[in-house]
Image (cartoon, rainbow, N blue to C red):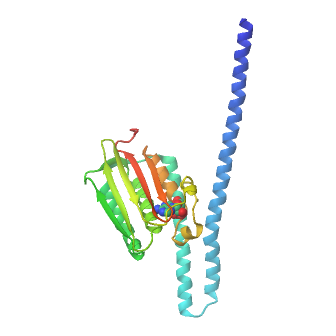
Amino acid sequence: RDFIIRTTSVGERLALGVITIVDDLTVRNQLDTIRRDFVANVSHELRTPIGALGLLAETLAFEDEPSVRQRLANRIQNEAFRVAKIIDDLLDLSRFESEGAASISRVSMPELAMEVIDQISPAAELQRVTIDLRLNSEDTYVLGDRGQLRSALTNLIDNSVKYSEPNSSVLVEISQNNSTVTVAVVDHGIGIPQKDIERIFERFYRVDQARSRQTGGTGLGLSIVRHAISNHNGTIEVDSREGAGSTFKIHLPIEPGANQ
Ligand code: ADP
């Protein structure tokens, strides 16, 4: 009987060993696929504006009419901004992924939100969208990485403006309970189809490619938000209805390392 038991346990160990090796290979293959897809996506995203830059410069060289030259120069500038934005977003994403929440300080969320709203307001005004801020206390702090939290708020508020209808408003609401600070960003814009909601946090995923590009989107904003918030042990909630609007809520524990 001893013999049988020992044989079985060795067999089990062997079987487990085989399963582990298969698992490692599967994970490695999956990571390879993700990396290959990512490189292909980045190349594609950069190739489009760089191709446009080449063509625009060539056209400019043969154009004499000053007003057309000016228009071409403006378009060259826009495409160059676009390349820079993609690179900046990629750098943020890779930094947030590899560093975690790097430099922790006491961050006033109302102050941070006001700073971000001031920065986005000129673009919002051009679109005739107003941004309101509502607080239940001026004294709302989290211990976190200010740069990452700023980036999360910037991307969420920027999206809510970009995907709003003209003459509508965006509400940023900050509230707090004993352990958690919640920032809700509410818009009355185009909304997100139900089938796309679970994919919008993936890199380069967009519901409408054309609208995202036209508004200067890189398709990386929500991946940046997701990493920044998960680095703070926070969570994100999305509630959206097509044609009616979207609400993105982030819940952040007040203390770093504390789980909700
Ligand atoms: P993008 O640069 O394209 O805005 P994001 O990663 O920030 O990329 O968002 C991914 C996609 O999610 C967007 O292309 C858009 O289709 C959708 N989306 C994000 N926020 C909103 C919003 N507030 N309202 C409607 N759609 C949104």
Q: Front-most of 244 and 126?
A: 244
- The image position of residue 153, as x and y in percent, is 41, 58
Using residue 34 as the reference point, say whether residue 139 is left or right of it.
Answer: left
Residue furthest to the top in view is 1
* Residue displayed at 48% across by 67% down: 163
> Is residue 92 visible to us here?
no
Residue 47 vertical placement versus 11 (above, below):
below
- Percent x, y for residue 35? 65, 51
**What is the quadrant of residue 205 in the picture?**
bottom right
Q: Is residue 233 above or below residue 174?
A: above
- The quarter of the image holding the C terminus is top left
Q: Tell whether 105 sits left or right of 161.
A: left
Numbered disc total: 0
Q: Residue at 61% x, 76% y: name it.
A: 53
The foreground one among 18 and 193 is 193
**Looking at the image, which residue sits at the far left?**
138
Residue 165 falls in image quadrant: bottom left
Report the quarter where the N terminus lies: top right
Q: Residue 23 appears at what percent x and percent y? A: 68, 35
Residue shown at the point (55%, 56%) measured from the top left: 194
Who's the residue at 48% across and 47% down the image?
99
Say left or right for 96 vs 150.
right
Residue 214: x, y in percent?
54, 72
Residue 171 in view:
yes
